[in-house]
Amino acid sequence: MKYDVCIVGTGAGASGVAHTLTEAGIKVVMLERGGFLKEKDFSKDEIAYCKRDIITPNLKESYHTIEALENRKWVKTPTYVTESSFFNGNIVGGSSNFMSGYFHRLKPVDFKLLSTYGAIKGANIVDWVIDYDELEPYFEKVERLVGVSGEVTPYKYHEPRSTKDFPYPPLDEHPISKLIDKSCKKLGFVPYKTPRAILSKPKDERANCYYSNYCGSYPCASGAKGSARASLLQPALKTGKLSIITHAFVKKLVEKNSKVIEAIYIDTQTKKEHRIKADIFVVAGQAVESSRLLLNSKSKNFPNGLANNAGQVGKNLLFSAGGVGSGLFDKNSMPLNELMKEGLFVNRSLCDWYEVDKMKGGVVDFLFEHANPISRASKQRWDGSKLLWGKELQDKIFNKFTTTKQLNFEVFNDWLPTDNCFVSVDEKYKDVYGVPVANIRRGAHPHDLKVAELLAQKAEEVLEEMGAKNIRSSMSSYPPANLQAGGCRFGDNPKTSVLNKHCQAHEVSNLFVSDGSFMPTGGSVTYTWTIYANSFRVGDYIVQNREEWIN
Amino acid sequence: MENIITRRVFIASSLLTGTALFLLPQGAKTSIKIEPFKVIAAVQEVLFPKDLDAPAASEFRATAYLLNVSTHSSFWTDDLNLLVNGAQKLIKKENNFLILNPIEQDAALRDFINNSQKGENWVALLLFYTLEALLSDPLYGGNKNNSGWKWLGHNTGKPQPKKMFAEEVS
C-alpha cells in the first residue's frame, strides 16, 4: 500500500504536520516506535512512568552512547552502563504525553541571535532564516488547537501577539504564588503567569484539568494536557485519512535518484521487517533519533547518510542550558494547611532577564517539587555521604513529608551550538536490531553556565525574600535528555545547513524534518511550543505545494 | 551485543504465613536460591523496623514486592545479582545474622558496611527497593493496605493503575 505521506514519529513535531495534512484530505501514515496508550490506560503509577524503562526502550534493546571529555579525550559511555536512558516517551504522542507543559513562545530576538549580540568565540551562532512574524500565526494556532491556558502579564521583553489573551483562562493557583508575587514586587521583579499547555476548560472531547498533583512525567488521564496524541492525533484519526502503525522502529530510509522511496521498519513485537512507500517522507523522531536515522540511511548517492553530503547532519545539536534550584518552606512561611494544599499550580516565571548585561539571558520557572513519593523518600537516604536507615531515616522521611514543602526553580537559557555537541553513529555500538545507536557528544560552551548562574542568583533572591530555608541551586553543563533540538539546522546555504527554510532537505526534495532538529539556535525557553508551531508551518507548506510530490 | 542482552530471570514466588517458598517453574533459565532472600528480608526489617507509627518492612511486604518486580523484564538484572551477592557476602561474614536480635543485626550491618564501599552500595540499593515497596501502588505487592501512604499522609494521584507496568487496559 502506498501513502501520500509517511511520518516517522508521532510527537509534537510530527503531529502538527499530520493534523494539517489529514485535514486537507492527504493520506498519511505515521510510524511510532512504541504502543498506543490512551486516557483509559493512564494512571499516576510512579513505578511504571518514573522508575522503569517501560515507555522507553529497554536499555538492553537500544541505548545511546554519551561522549564526554575525560582527561582531554572524548570517551563514549553507553547508557546501559550508567543506567540513565536518553530516550523520551516512546508511545503515540511521544514525550508530549509526559511534559509539564510550561509553555513559552520564542521572542523576536531568538531569531536574530547573531545580528543582535554578535559572535561568541567557539560558538556557531547564526540568525534564523525566518523571523518571529512568520511563526507568530502558528504560535497562536497552538494556543487554540493544543490548548494553552494563561493570562498575558506585561513585562519588558514580552513578545508581540496577534490576539489579546490566551483562549483558556489560567489554572487554579496555590497560595504560594501570592507570596512569590509579593516578594518579587519588593525586589522590583515582574512575576509572569506561566502559560501552560493544560486545559482549564473542556475542549471537544478533552476534559479540563482535575488537579491530580501528579502532572509532569505522568500521562494525563483527562486529556487536559496538550499532548500531541490528545490534542492533534485523536482528532486527525477521525478524518479517516490517518493510519498509525505502532511498535514500528524505523531503521532506514531508502533513497533513489535523490528521493526517498520507502521506509524500512522493524516490528519490535514480531521482529519482522516491513517496508512502506510514500510520495513524501517527514522525519520527526526527536532531534537525536532523527539525526541517527538520516546518518544510518546510507546509499550510493549519500555515503555519509541521507541529506548529509555537506556533513551537517547531527551537527550543532542543542539542549537547554541552565539547571535547578530549590528552597524549603514550613509553617513559619504560611499556615501549614495552606502550604500543604495539593494539586494547585505555582505557575510563575521570571522573564525580566531575557537580556542580561548585554548578553542573551533566559527564563526562570517556579514549581513545586514533584509529588513522587518514592523519589522524595529515596533522596532522604543520604545525609551528605552518610547512609541513613532505621529510625533515623524514618524520622527524616516523616518530617520531609509532613512538615515541609520544597519549591523548585528551573533556569532555561541558550545552549550555544558548538563543534563539540553533535550526534554521530559508530559501527561499534549497535542495538539489538543491528542498527548503530546514536552517539551524543555532549560538549557545552562555558558561556552557557555563566548566563545560567546569573539567572539562578536572581531566583535565589526571590526564595530568600520569600523566607525559604536551605536555598540551593546547581547549574550544570550536563544535557537534559528531554530538551533536545538542532542537528539538522535550517538555512539558505546547503553547505552549512541540512534543511531549507521550509524544513525540506536541500539535497532530497521529498524529505522533511519537522521536529526540533531544524533549530539553529535554541532560544531560552522550553522547545515544545516552538516545535508544535513549526510543525504546523511545515504542514501548511506541504499542503500548499502538494502537486509537486503527490500524484 | 551478547553481553547486554537481557538474561531473564524466572522466579515464581508464594508467601505462606510469613515464610517464603520459592517454586521454580520448569524450564527456568536461572534459579534463585532461597537463602539470600531470607537474608534480604531480615536486612529490610533492620533498615525499616517497626516504629511508633511507621510500618515495618515485613508489614508493608518489602520482600514480596522485590520478588514480584524482579521477575519483570524492566528490572535491572545487574541489580538482582548485586542484591543476591550482597546477601551472600553478609551471611558469609556474619554466619548467625538470621538468629541475632534486632539490635545485634543493626550493629552487624553497620560493621558490614564499615570500610566497605561495596557493602554500603548494597545496603543503599536494598534500601532503595525497600522504599519503592513502601510507597508504590499496592498493586505491585508492597505498601500493604496503603500503609506507607497512610503513615506519611500521602494522597496518591488518581487514577491508580489497574495494571502493572503501564500495560494497556482492555
Image (cartoon, coloured by chain):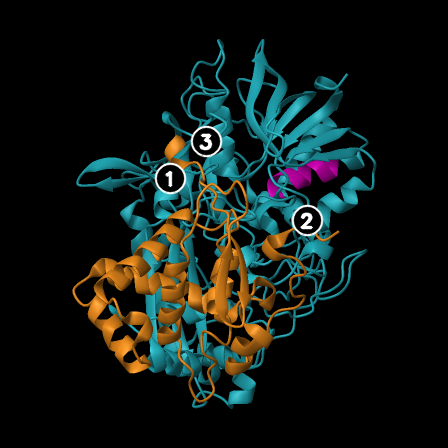
Judge left or right: residue A224 versus residue A130.
right
Q: Is residue B113 magenta?
A: no
Q: Quadrant of the N terminus of chain A?
A: top right
The residue identified by callout 3 is: A431
Q: Which of marks 2 and 3 is nearer the N terminus?
A: 2
Which segment is the magenta one? A12-20
- Viewer-side residue, A348 vs A108: A348
Vertical side of A467 occupied by A34: above or below:
above
In percent of width and height, residue A343 lies at 60, 73
Are the residues flagged by discs 1 and 3 from a single subunit? yes
- Viewer-side residue, A430 vs A305: A430
Q: Quadrant of the C terminus of chain A?
A: top right
Place residue A28 in its image quadrant: top right
Vertical side of A287 occupied by A404: above or below:
below
Q: Can residue A357 be seen in this view?
A: no
Q: Helix, strand or loop at disc 2? A: loop
Main SS of residues in magenta: helix
In percent of width and height, residue A70 lies at 21, 41
Q: Residue A37 carries which label?
A: 2
The residue identified by callout 1 is: A417
In percent of width and height, residue A515 lies at 56, 38
Q: Helix, strand or loop at disc 1? A: loop
Vertical side of B48 occupied by A121: above or below:
above
Q: Distance between the residues labelled 1 and 3?
A: 28 Å
Q: Does the magenta stretch include residue A17?
A: yes
